[in-house]
Image (spheres, helix red, strand yellow):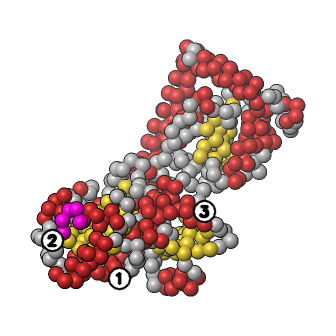
Amino acid sequence: MFSIVLLFFLNLVFGNVIHVTEDLFRTILDESPLTVVGFHKGDNDTVSQLKMLEKKISSSAINYFDINCNENETICNLHDIRKYPEFVVYNNFVITFYSKVDDILINDLQNIIYGIREINSTELDKMILNNQTFVLLHYTSQETVKDFLSLAKAVRRIPFYSIKDTYKSLILYNNEFNPLPVPLDIDINTIFKTICSYSNPIVSNLNADIIKRNFRSRDIIVFYNKEINENDLIELKKIALENRPWLVTYVDNQNEILDLLPVREAPAVFSYSMKTLEPTIPLILSEEGKWSEIRNYIKECAYGRVKQFIKNSDPIDEDKQGLVHEINANELEAYKHDYKDLILLVCDSVSEDCIKAKKEFDIAANMLVKQKYTDLAFIDIDKNTVETCTSQYPMIVMYSGIVERSCFSDNRPITAQVIVTLARERGVFTIQLNSFNPEKEMIDPQEALKLRKALLKERSGFEESSEFISVSSSWRSYLKRKDNLYKAKSFTRILND
């Protein structure tokens, strides 16, 4: 403590020009758990920034002082100071470098000293009124606050606050859009990425910092025009508010990274899928209709009709499949041109309705286990771009027929009885159409799975036979000729129009 007092006295007597030995400097750091040092080359701006920081975070836990490297070159070299100014936080032997006093440095210090700071409703209202960007943790116990401190330290750029409540939640306040509740049932890494991405400006100039802070959390829409005016920003903000899952950005001829982008004609729009990290081919826009065209373009991307945004989940190993197979978008496309009947559950796997429907499918699959050429499957629309004969989910969809392949969506409630009845209505089964007796027809789940795998192996052997290959070749040839005929008729119709 004596060393810190001595340094303070030297500052008062001699001003900024102080020769500090390495031993004295090391002693000061050892005696103070938290020290902020501004290294500079004699400029007053560094001293002013340091004083501003001390005024903002005035705490007996922090010691502030500046070192002029013109007068203390040895210390600056020993502490690896290569550029000026440099602000360094020494916290219990952990050293962090900053190029300036900014929100990151301020939030880091506040998190070290206070943790996640508690506020009351009056303070919250004032912060919202001042259009501040911050994260608010509603907590029911102090343990919750401790659990999220590591997240606050990781985010850094945005301050975290807590408020006592009867329920637990995490809300991001961004002054440009409505408060965003962050789901707590996802992993902490995803929460971190979500907060970083949504704390970006709602519309911003595309640059490396914006891309970095997005953490591949949201796909990016890029609007290009030779010049971006105030009206462009107003319209882009409207589009961004309508499409919050997208990060809306813009570039003009002054943008430093323009040469790296795939645009040459203006106005235009393109997008980056965070799955492929590839830009789409730019869509050239009309001057008079560009805003509606951008809206339509975003819809096309969302529906997976733009190549980079087609979602296709990884196939599941056959050994891990149950009676109801989980398939992806590519496997569904194959079924559309197959000979087997497919009864498909189309839904979002995390929704409550979908979870209930999957249980009903499990019962039906057990009852239909002996039907060798009928498959029951499920596809997750959250992970796959799905185009079927319905746009409502959850829904039962059935593909049947060989030469005339048809798609049928069943609007009846998703129950095991409806699924079994559908299979027997549209297939050829010996069991009476309206019979439904699970207690009598169901068998032990393990036995059912074993039987199903044996039947699939038998079916696979048949599909490899010369007889089947010959028949399927003729069938596919017919379909190809039919498809080409359809295309020719469509082309002729376009020409006539």
Instruction: Magenta stretch: give its range.
Output: 20-24
Which element is circle 2 on?
Answer: loop
Which label number is shown at residue 19?
2
Quarter of the image for the N terminus: give it.
Answer: bottom left
Report the magenta stretch's main SS.
helix
Q: Label 1 amino acid?
A: Lys
Answer with mark 2 or mark 1, whichever residue precedes in sequence.
2
Q: Label 2 amino acid?
A: His
Q: Quadrant of residue 137?
A: bottom right
Q: Nearer the viewer, mark 2 or mark 3?
A: 2
Kindly report the distance in space between the C-alpha atoms of the residues bearing marks 2 and 1.
26 Å
Kindly report the distance in space between the C-alpha atoms of the residues bearing marks 2 and 3.
47 Å
Q: Is residue 462 visible?
A: yes
Q: Are marks 2 and 1 in contact (CB under 8 Å)?
A: no
In the shown orientation, is residue 193 left or right of residue 2? right
- Residue 97 location, x and y as percent? 28, 63
Residue tagged 3: 143
Residue tagged 1: 55
Circle 1 crowding by C-alpha within 10 Å: few under 14, some 14–19, many from 20? few
The extreme left residue here reads 70
Which element is circle 3 on?
Answer: helix
Which label number is shown at residue 339?
none
Q: Is residue 209 magenta?
A: no
Frontmost residue, 152 versus 125: 152
- Residue 201 location, x and y as percent? 39, 71
